[in-house]
Image: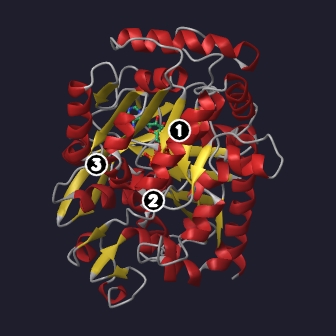
């Protein structure tokens, strides 16, 4: 089976969050299962051309791509996902991609990804490589299913090509003014109230993907259920209910070649389930590095996150006095909204012995925090899958989470299971999205931390969990078969 992945992020080349981790890992595991995979990604300025040995792709050559009245000369570069034979194609168009960040608020953000979607299709044609499935990820690739079925339906080459829309976060829908319809060369008659590409007066690339794909999935089972409701669906719940027979959740896996405390190249003391006590050395190292005092009796709370309200920072703001009054230390890494960046900057200024914060993106530090912290806090309002809590389990860093989406599917509350007579809890979670619930759950966690034996048990329970990609990759293959069936026989 041939599968093309199109994504706006692929680790290690370009990543802002979990999407990059997934598209940097899943193709490798599919390849191991015998799938012929190619990955497509824009060639952003942040991608280190020489580090990854990018070659010019001669079979594709130079492609003229028309967009909003201008013809752009697009070139394509080629490399491999590190440690694998999976080919990655980088769509190069400096006018659109040579900017400071992967995503922008520029007025032509729609054009940047219209061009990407068209370039993926034209590259496939020129490579003469006919995929059985194109797996799209989020709104940035949402036009592909529509293009394949409509704009490029003249090309018999794609007759047998099915499309999958994977939702990594339904909160980002690629909504643009109606003029975008013309820029994207979508047939104007497809834009009307409640049409397959319209939502609240805007055109939505994600909605287009959901309506035209042959099958849809998202990244956990609980989130799949949640987003068919108005509370979580962000306006697209009706579309998802309409497509319910073609829609499912598949939990993301973890690339344990990257996230494993036994082999992690960024941490000074490697450790495993047999040598859990070594973890302490990483805490010491982290605290020394950030000039905070090491005290084994004070739990160190780690946060690694995009600093946006979705991740629960509004709850943290509302409970900040209670949290700061607790006997905890904090190591916080993230970037995002000014409000939260400023809060954490001032907290580390006000409480230098208690709070360390680094505002920015820092791959190495994210690994150090996973290895050094005792507790990992992730109180997301909603969470499609969430990866850091799963990494935390492997690193013996006990997660404290809001029980939603992928967090609910991966973290078992210690007290809830204990009350049932089971000692299998892996973390702490709270049901109601309220500051008081967050604070009392942090108190529960800090209380259990004092009981070292029980804490060790919880760490152990998390560390033996296996969320590797193998099982999820097989589910993707089943989904591809389903999409191919839908495409050919419906
Ligand atoms: P989301 O995709 O919603 O941002 P996930 O938990 O699925 O959340 O994935 C987040 C990924 O991004 C993790 O690999 C995490 O380590 C990484 N990450 C987030 N913020 C930072 C940061 N500031 N520096 C380094 N890595 C980060």
Residue 148 in percent (x, y) is at 49, 69
Tell me what residue is drawn at x 30 percent, y 82 percent: 200
Tag 2 secondary structure: loop
- Mark number, residue 138: 2
Q: Which of 199/294 is in front?
A: 294
Tag 3 secondary structure: loop
| Earlier-in-chain disc, 3 versus 1 | 3
Tag 1 secondary structure: helix
Q: Quadrant of ligand 1?
A: top left
Q: The C terminus appears in which quarter of the rendering?
A: bottom right
Q: Dot 1, crowdedness within 10 Å: few (<14), some or many (≥20)?
A: many
Query: Is residue 97 shown left or right of residue 302?
Result: left
- Residue behind label 1 places its C-beta within 8 angstroms of ligand 1: yes
Residue 53 seen in render: no
**Residue 191 appears in which quarter of the rendering?**
bottom left
Above/below status of 307 relative to 294: below
**Residue 177 appears in which quarter of the rendering?**
bottom left
**Cα–Cα gap, marks 2 and 1:** 20 Å
Residue 26 in percent (x, y) is at 62, 43
- What residue did someone put label 3 on? 103
- What residue did someone put label 1 on? 388
Tell me what residue is drawn at x 49 percent, y 22 percent: 298
| Earlier-in-chain disc, 2 versus 1 | 2
In the rendered image, the residue lying farthest to the right is 421
Q: Dot 3, crowdedness within 10 Å: few (<14), some or many (≥20)?
A: few
Tell me what residue is drawn at x 33 percent, y 26 percent: 355
**Cα–Cα gap, marks 2 and 3:** 13 Å
Judge depth for marks 2 and 1 and give the one in front.
1
């Amino acid at each position: 089976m041939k599968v093309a992945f199109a994504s706006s992020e692929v680790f290690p080349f370009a990543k802002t969050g979990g999407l990059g981790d997934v598209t940097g890992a899943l193709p490798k595991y599919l390849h191991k299962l015998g799938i012929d995979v190619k990955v497509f990604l824009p060639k952003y300025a942040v991608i280190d051309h020489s580090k990854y040995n990018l070659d010019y792709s001669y079979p594709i050559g130079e492609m003229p791509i028309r967009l909003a009245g201008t013809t752009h000369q697009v070139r394509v570069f080629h490399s491999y996902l590190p440690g694998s034979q999976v080919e990655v194609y980088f769509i190069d168009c400096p006018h659109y991609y040579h900017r400071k960040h992967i995503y922008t608020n520029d007025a032509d953000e729609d054009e940047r990804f219209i061009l990407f979607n068209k370039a993926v299709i034209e590259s496939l044609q020129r490579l003469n490589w006919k995929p059985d499935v194109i797996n799209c990820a989020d709104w940035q690739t949402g036009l592909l299913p529509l293009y394949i079925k409509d704009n490029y339906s003249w090309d018999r080459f794609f007759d047998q090509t099915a499309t999958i829309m994977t939702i990594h976060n339904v909160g980002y829908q690629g909504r643009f003014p109606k003029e975008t319809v013309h820029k994207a060369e979508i047939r104007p008659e497809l834009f009307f109230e409640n049409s397959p590409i319209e939502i609240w007066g805007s055109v939505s690339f994600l909605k287009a993907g959901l309506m035209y794909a042959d099958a849809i999935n998202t990244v956990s089972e609980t989130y799949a259920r949640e987003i068919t409701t108005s509370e979580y669906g962000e306006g697209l719940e009706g579309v998802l209910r309409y497509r319910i027979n073609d829609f499912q959740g598949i939990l993301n896996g973890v690339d344990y070649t990257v996230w494993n405390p036994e082999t992690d190249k960024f941490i000074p003391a490697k450790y495993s389930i047999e040598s859990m006590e070594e973890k302490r050395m990483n805490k010491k190292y982290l605290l020394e590095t950030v000039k905070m005092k090491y005290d084994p009796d004070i739990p160190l709370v780690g946060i690694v996150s995009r600093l946006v309200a979705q991740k629960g920072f509004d709850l943290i703001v509302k409970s900040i006095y209670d949290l700061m009054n607790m006997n905890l230390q904090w190591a916080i890494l993230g970037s995002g909204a000014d409000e939260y960046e400023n809060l954490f900057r001032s907290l580390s200024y006000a409480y230098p012995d208690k709070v360390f914060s680094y505002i920015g993106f820092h791959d190495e530090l994210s690994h150090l925090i996973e290895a050094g912290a005792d507790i990992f806090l992730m109180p997301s309002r909603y969470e499609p899958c969430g990866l850091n809590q799963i990494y935390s389990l492997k690193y013996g860093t006990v997660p404290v989470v809001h029980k939603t989406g992928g967090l609910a599917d991966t973290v078992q509350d210690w007290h809830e299971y204990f009350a049932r007579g089971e000692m299998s809890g892996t973390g702490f979670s709270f049901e109601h999205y309220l500051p008081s619930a967050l604070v009392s759950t942090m108190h529960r966690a800090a209380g259990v931390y004092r009981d070292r034996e029980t804490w060790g048990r919880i760490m152990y329970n998390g560390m033996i969990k296996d969320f590797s990609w193998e099982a999820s990759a097989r589910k993707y293959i089943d989904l591809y078969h389903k999409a191919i069936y839908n495409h050919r026989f419906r």
